[in-house]
Image (cartoon, rainbow, N blue to C red):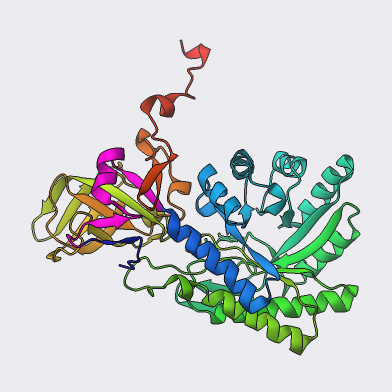
Amino acid sequence: MNYRDTLKPNKKGELMIGGLSASELASTYGTPLYVMDVAHIRAICKAFKDTIETVYGGYGGVAFASKAFSTKAIYTIMKNMDMDIDVVSGGEIFTALSAGFDLSRAYFHGNNKLLSELEYATDNNIGVIVIDNIEEIALLNEICRKKGQVQKVNIRTNPGVEAHTHSYIQTAKIDSKFGFSISTGDAIEAIDNILNATNLKLNGVNCHIGSQIFDSNAFRLAVDVMTDFIVDIKVKHKLDIEELNMGGGFGVHYTNDDPKYSVEDYCNNIRIIASAINDAIDSKGIKKPRLMVEPGRSIVGEAGITLYTVGNIKDIKGIKKYICIDGGMFDNIRPALYQADYEAVIATNCNAKTVEDVAIAGKCCESGDIIIDKIAMPICTRGDLIAIMTTGAYNYSMASNYNRNAIPPVIMVENGKSGYCVKPQTYEDIASRDTVPDFLD
Ligand SMILES: Cc1ncc(COP(=O)(O)O)c(C=O)c1O
């Protein structure tokens, strides 16, 4: 467990989040319940921004990848923390605008942005559209020409560096649905097309080499490829690239197999990226680009905790014991989707001695609805409050109404205060958009 000041057990062993006990929160709001520790989110945003200030002269910024957790409240926090954001759909743009977020601070990503989404984004003066496909160049140029607008664009490249949790590989792998491969020449061709487009203005180049990355060498290598690309553009077009966006992907602690980072440790990747760019500026003779990073998971991941109540226990003697909880894949699809791992504690007694291996099972009608397949736990009984850690990123944002379960509410906590960030869903809400076609009657 990666405890911190705003997330740790008190003297009685009870889990405290943002100055409130998990059991108090559960009795006020019910379970399942997503809890977001706002102080942690703010601390990470501040530390990331301060790092760019100290190691890169403040020439750049941090865009929160809001796909990790998109709600009005998080955009409000980002606005107050003077952050940029990355959005990937009309829905995220709408939510950000509803929170009063200034869309000129937004980067719009996506491998197949809809015409309607491009119209919506440009109507609302989005800051940068990150071109991800050759057809998008003409499509967006035409939209902007009709409106008499000039749109700032970046291009998403594929630098051929693929990073995964604890390792990376450099490949010529070009089968990703995202971005323009640099090695095949697709990226430079996209640059040519953008420079010929009357209503697009090239602002920068992007990459995003993966997620949950702990091996910083992957970022060093990616900077090397990206700055070589910037040199290529300079040679071919006599043009200095203004912005280099290195994406997100910084790893967070899910289980004991992962490092336990402090807020300061989290900034190491930015330090490494910045120093690699500084080296390249000298050795490759490029103009200092503005440095953007785009982290999602590392800003909200560890800030999130999900609270569940234990229901049935199924003990298949000598084989497996299931602790069944009142949530499941409808609030956390990640284990079923890509075998994501988690840690759990009994929230009222975090220090209880673990005595047996169990599985923590969701309530959905899918055998694969297992939140943790094997974890050492104390004896759990009906009514116990379980906390699953590091559920702030890609949990609520991927929630569904599978089996017509209600998506749990999200609350935010800070300095002993709590409040809804997403209100509870009722059964009426779930069925509210259903209709029965006339011909069925
Ligand atoms: C283009 C881009 N930027 C940023 C991110 C955020 O990544 P992470 O949440 O791992 O920091 C993603 C995640 O998929 C992405 O695709």
Image mark count: 0
Work out which residue is located at the far top of the displayed protein and give it: 441
Magenta stretch holds residue 32? yes
Question: Hey, which quadrant is residue 197 in on the image?
Answer: bottom right
x, y percent for residue 137: 80, 54
x, y percent for residue 93: 64, 44
**Magenta-drawn segment:** 11-36
Where is 50 relative to 231, above or below? above
Where is 247 relative to 70, above or below? below
Magenta stretch holds residue 97? no
Q: Quadrant of ligand 1?
A: bottom right
Q: Nearer the viewer, residue 335 or 423?
A: 423
- Inspect this view and state whether residue 408 appears: yes
Left or right of 211: which side holds 284?
right
- At x 66%, y 73%, the residue is 159
Left or right of 402: which side holds 114?
right
Q: Nearer the viewer, residue 22 or 107?
A: 22
Left or right of 408: which side holds 92?
right
Task: Give the quarter of the figure containing the N terminus.
Answer: bottom left
